[in-house]
Amino acid sequence: MKNTKKTAEILYWIILSIVIIIGITIRTDVWLNEPSFFGDETTLLSNIKNRNFIGIFSALDSAQSCPTFFLVVNKIIYSFFGLNETALRFFSYLCGIFSLCIIPFFKDLLFKNKSLNLLLIVMLTLNGELLYYSQEFKQYSSDVFFTLLILLLFFKTKDKVINLKSALIVGTIFGIAGFFSFTSEFLVFSICLYFIYIFIRNKSYKPILGLTIPYLFGLLIQYILVFHGTLTNGIMECWSDEPFAFETFSTTIQTISSLTTNLLDGEIIFVIFILGIIICIIKDKLLAYLLIMPIILNMISGLLDIYPFTNSRVILYLTPIFLILCLKTFDAIHTKNKLINTSFGFFILLTILSLYIHANDYIYKTPIGDKSYYYIRSNAREYINHLDKREIKPTDKIFVDDQSAGAFDIYYKEKNYDENIIFQSWQNQLSFNDRDTETQHTHLNELPKGTNIWFYNTPHYPDIVRVEEINEWINENTKILLSEKDDMGELLYVEKIK
């Protein structure tokens, strides 16, 4: 029996190591091979580029919102490496890896069947959303890591928070948590409520003050420096346009299904999720509270238009929580026989793995040349490289699609293209995008005959860019003067004839 237990333990750690290595390899490949920045990334980068270290502690421009720690880390990186996609995406990439590597430290804290711990890492490794955002120059990958880190630290220290001194330390840490991750506040607030409940139950009231005063002071500082400006910089208008989870039952199902990367059909995964919640409440009430309360708080904040709760990147931090609750369904099948438990765990592992591979066959969906890109949103860098080799006449127009608009600003640096550029907007295809910089407010159809226009189109964009419409307009309204193809797309120089 001892040999069986030892063999199962060795096998577990071998497979665990292999899965983590695979996860690191995939994320490294995506990190090193992704193409140029797109609009959101470059809008955030412009805040870092145009501000000093003190300036990034205040509310950001252009409806951006980002934790201060992320900004500081990448301000340092930008100071050394400048406009370097690989360097500026490094912190997100690192957090994506840490999110995998932290799971083994939970050991028996999440599941009775340790094989489910292994399965959780597999699901985190192959999750399409986590994979993509582990390389994007935004804070969503770090949100996932800090959520897991706070959860782990709670389990490791919860029995040591018993007096005023320990409560002060915890309250201070919680007070600065929002500077590392906005979404950590949902989990931190839940933990604070738990500690307050314990202190009241033990009739120990001084630690309550030690916990809440530094925590509330930290929230006040964050509100003054960041949140107050965020409420007025336009981002809330963007969020308030989104549907929230309580508006329709189907939106909640879609959210859970999306964050588990369509492991199964939305209704099926929702049933598994609900069963997991029930089992978690029955078997481990504390864990159930810690996992469910942040979801409830996020939903409430969504209803109040404070922070959205939709199948969106802003709640990517909930992905591990959703997955843990789904896997709790299988944790109910637990016996005293280690071999049976391990065998069952590996069976579930192989089943879920096969489903995940099927659901995520788009991980390398866009082969271009000798590389495979996960998701191409911008060709701005390549466009600039092409234009640098050409003579741009003062009367030429340069058409830039919506996804590349912000990136185009960053990549052309000090080049004098401003007066030539026409931007596509989300609302009005083939038009311009209202921007902070001065642009020519002209629709392509309003340009006079004889106008020469530069285009750089790629067939690999998501549907929102609608390259087909652009090409159709070119074919109907212009004469092609120059056509130059490369792996990323096609550079066109045309003359308007209609």
Image: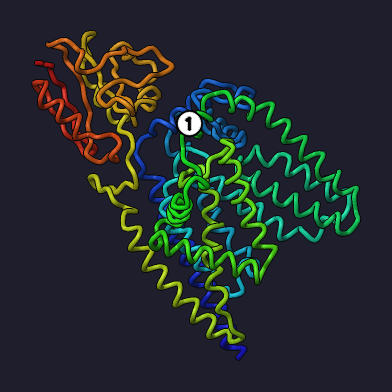
Q: Is residue 21 left or right of residue 466?
A: right
Seen from this angle, which residue lies furthest bottom?
1
Residue drawn at x 50%, y 50% is 96
Residue drawn at x 42%, y 58% is 126
Q: Where does the image place residue 338, in percent across and percent down from the top left?
A: 58, 84
Q: Where does label 1 land, which residue?
A: 238
- The answer to whether residue 355 is above or below residue 318 is below
Number of other residues with Cα within 10 Å of mark 1, as a class: few under 14, some 14 to 19, many 20 or more: few
In-front residue for pair 98/118: 118
Report if residue 416 is visible in the image.
Answer: no
- The answer to whether residue 344 is above or below residue 319 is below
Q: Is residue 269 left or right of residue 405?
A: right
Name the kind of residue labelled 1 in the image: Cys
Q: What colouring does the structure picture have?
A: rainbow
- The answer to whether residue 51 is above or below residue 354 is above
Quadrant position of the N terminus in the picture: bottom right
Image quarter for residue 406? top left
Image quarter for residue 341? bottom right
Quadrant position of the C terminus in the picture: top left
Label 1 element class: helix
Residue drawn at x 30%, y 33% is 379
Q: Where does the image place residue 279, in percent across and percent down from the top left?
A: 60, 70
In-front residue for pair 149/178: 178
Q: Where does the image place residue 486, in percent across and percent down from the top left?
A: 19, 36
Q: Is residue 316 left or right of residue 411?
A: right
In-front residue for pair 32/130: 130
Q: How many marks?
A: 1
Q: Where does the image place residue 381, in percent across and percent down from the top left?
A: 32, 30
Report if residue 155 is visible in the image.
Answer: yes
- The answer to whether residue 39 is above or below residue 374 is above
